[in-house]
Image (tube, grey):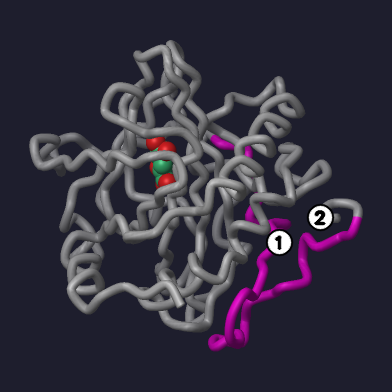
Amino acid sequence: MAALSAEEIARYRRDGVLIPDHRVPAGRLAELRAALDEVLANNPDRRPEQLVSAHVSGTNKEGVRGHAAFLEIARDPDILDLVGQLIGQDIALWGCHIFCKPGGDGLEVPWHQDGHYWPIRPLATCTAWLALDDSTVANGCLRVIPGSQVSKTLHAHLREDRADLALNRAIDPALMDEAEAMDVELEAGQLSLHDVHIIHGSNPNRSDRRRAGVAIRFMPTTSHFDRGLFKPGAETGLHIDFATRPLWLLRGIDRCGRNDFTIGHDESVTA
Ligand SMILES: O=C(O)CCC(=O)C(=O)O
């Protein structure tokens, strides 16, 4: 079992982010990178920072042609062991978003809290952000404000419809201090874990090296994925449809008893 120490768990609770001592094996990483190449080739009309539901193969209802390799990695027992120590052993997979920033023109991800957009009540999610390329300050690694999740407050976000942003909602700058930011630098195959309430974002990629990562979204099944809460795509500028988004029960049982694990699993969509 991939295990976090008591100190690491305490650090995650305090900071809202953790880089566990874990690496995806080289062979697996190579498969994922090949799958990424296919997803990029199959979605030429979609910005590569906006590849939502990349784990759903075929043409999914959110318009992205994903790849089963990303579903496979979401089922990885080591990753589930790590996540389970943070959110409990009843785990649902509800999302998987590739953020690939090409060298030279990779978009900025504005400072935001994910919880702002997500129809999960009570709001609880751990994201495993797996680096498919080395992710560094130079190529626009993930940045977080450690501790910003502790109060579990969702702060006001402002709408910014700029073509150079990967999302169109950004936290009101008066409500945070960028000087407190921590750069989450990772080598390809490493991952970070972050809490649903943490303030995070990333700079544009001004280097000539691609920065790709996949954000795998896990929630405890004590929470309800409430499909009716938001209108499709209304909140983020992303093409998302929570009404038809498939969920997978990966461990344990559906504790709240209200999650629907059948919707969106039409064979032609997820096969
Ligand atoms: O990959 C990035 O730069 C941003 C990731 C992000 O916003 C997320 O995982 O929620």
State which image quarter holds ligand 1: top left
In the rendered image, residue 214 lying in the magenta stretch gets the answer no
Looking at the image, is 229 positioned above or below residue 6? Answer: above
For the residue pair 65 and 163, the one nearer the viewer reads as 65
State which region is magenta.
Answer: 238-267
Q: Label 2 is placed on what type of residue?
A: Thr
**At numbered mark 1, what does the secondary structure look like: helix, strand or loop?**
loop
Work out which quarter of the rendered image holds the C terminus and state it. Answer: bottom right
Mark earlier in primary sequence (1, 2):
1
Q: Label 1 is placed on what type of residue?
A: Pro
Looking at the image, is 269 positioned above or below residue 258? Answer: above
Looking at the image, is 88 positioned above or below residue 37? Answer: below
Task: Estimate how packed mark 2 is, as few (under 14), some (14 to 19) or many (20 or more) residues with alpha carbons within 10 Å.
Answer: some
Image location (x, y in percent) of residue 97: 55, 45
Q: Is the magenta region chiefly helix, strand or loop? A: loop
**Do labels 1 and 2 touch, CB within 8 Å?**
yes
Residue under the image location 18 percent in, 55 percent down: 148
Residue under the image location 55 percent in, 61 percent down: 229
Image location (x, y in percent) of residue 47: 59, 24
Image location (x, y in percent) of residue 230: 56, 54
- Whether residue 135 sits left or right of residue 259 in the image: it is left
Q: Which residue is mark 2?
A: 270
Image location (x, y in percent) of residue 103: 45, 16
**Mark 1, mark 2: which one is toward the viewer?**
2
For the residue pair 205 and 199, the one nearer the viewer reads as 205
**At numbered mark 2, what does the secondary structure look like: helix, strand or loop?**
helix
Q: Which mark is residue 246?
A: 1
Residue under the image location 24 percent in, 45 percent down: 144
- Whether residue 78 sits left or right of residue 233 in the image: it is left
Residue under the image location 61 percent in, 42 percent down: 52
For the residue pair 161 and 41, the one nearer the viewer reads as 41
